[in-house]
């Protein structure tokens, strides 16, 4: 049995993805600062705490089985959503910890297991500023650019090893009615090869 780990799991998209992969036979590990509110197998970790995040993913793999699919999709803090002229270096440091160092920590924790399996998928979920910088939300625009660059390099490097790396861009707020469809799209990104970046309307860019 292998495991889906959702980093930044919440009651909306994270729960829908957990249901979709769970129905396909995956064990599900929900990584969140408050996982007890989600049901299922929750593991507490703040993505800005590398030791806690690595430990949570390691514990999940030990208890549930090797992590075959990693989804990194925490919702950015409001502090990252300031206009560019109001954004400080400290704001950007926090955003980079959240959206660049967090993903790197998570990938480093699960990649050895995926390599042992000979397969896997790493799925990054970002808002619209992950592809089109928006001066109204400077922190995420800057940090998501770094996350996207990191993911694209992984896509090119790990593809020959049978490890799929993809980014789903979801512009705007996620409505409850959209979550099952987005979960299905993430399932397809995990299951099929393709471009690194896909928009939630299905187009690659």
Image (spheres, grey):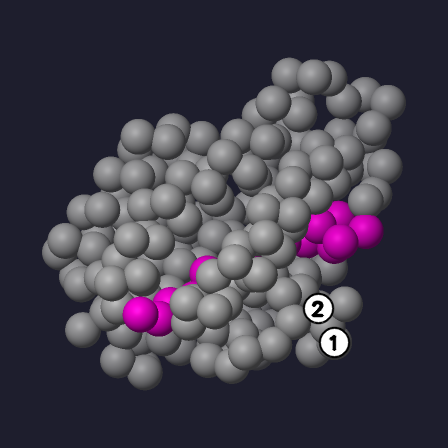
For mark 1, what is the residue? Answer: 203
Instruction: Say which of 168 and 111 sits in front.
Output: 111
**Residue 80 appears at what percent x and percent y?**
66, 32
Spatial CA span between label 2 and label 1 = 5 Å
Residue at 28 percent of width and 47 percent of height: 57
**Residue 52 appears at what percent x and percent y?**
30, 33
Q: Work out whether residue 153 can be spotted.
A: yes
Residue 174 placement: quadrant: bottom right
**Residue 154 appears at what percent x and percent y?**
53, 55
Residue 125 placement: quadrant: bottom right
In the picture, the disc for residue 192 is none
Task: Count neighbours of disc 1 (C-alpha within 10 A) and say few if under 14, some if 14 to 19, many if 20 or more.
Answer: few
Residue at 51 percent of width and 81 percent of height: 192
Quadrant showing the N terminus: bottom left
Left or right, 102 with respect to 3, comes to right
User: Bounds of the magenta span?
Assistant: 118-132
Residue at 86 percent of width and 22 percent of height: 85
For mark 2, what is the residue? Answer: 199
Q: Work out whether residue 36 can be spotted.
A: no
**Residue 7 appears at what percent x and percent y?**
41, 50
Label 2: element kind: strand
Q: Is residue 54 magenta?
A: no
Left or right, 197 with respect to 120, comes to right
Asked if residue 87 is positioned above or below residue 26 in the image, the reply reads above
Q: Is residue 123 magenta?
A: yes
Label 1: element kind: loop
Please, which residue is most extreme toward the left here?
63
Left or right, 182 with respect to 201, comes to left
Q: Are marks 2 and 1 in contact (CB under 8 Å)?
A: yes
Residue at 76 percent of width and 67 percent of height: 205
Task: Count neighbours of disc 2 (C-alpha within 10 A) and say few if under 14, some if 14 to 19, many if 20 or more.
Answer: some
């Amino acid at each position: 049995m292998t495991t889906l780990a959702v980093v930044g799991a919440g009651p909306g998209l994270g729960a829908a993805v957990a249901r979709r992969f769970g129905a396909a036979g995956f064990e599900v590990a929900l990584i969140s600062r408050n996982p007890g509110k989600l049901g299922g197998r929750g593991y507490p970790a703040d993505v800005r705490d590398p030791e806690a995040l690595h430990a949570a993913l390691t514990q999940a793999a030990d208890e549930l089985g090797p992590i075959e699919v990693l989804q990194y999709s925490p919702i950015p803090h409001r502090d990252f959503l300031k206009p560019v002229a109001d954004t400080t270096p400290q704001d950007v440091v926090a955003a980079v910890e959240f959206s660049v160092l967090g993903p790197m920590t998570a990938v480093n924790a699960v990649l050895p297991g995926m390599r042992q399996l000979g397969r896997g998928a790493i799925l990054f979920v970002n808002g619209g500023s992950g592809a089109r910088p928006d001066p109204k939300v400077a922190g995420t625009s800057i940090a998501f650019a770094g996350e996207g660059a990191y993911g694209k390099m992984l896509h090119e490097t790990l593809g020959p090893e049978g490890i799929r790396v993809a980014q789903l861009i979801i512009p705007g707020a996620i409505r409850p009615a959209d979550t099952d469809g987005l979960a299905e799209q993430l399932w397809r990104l995990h299951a099929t090869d393709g471009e690194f970046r896909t928009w939630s309307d299905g187009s690659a860019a």
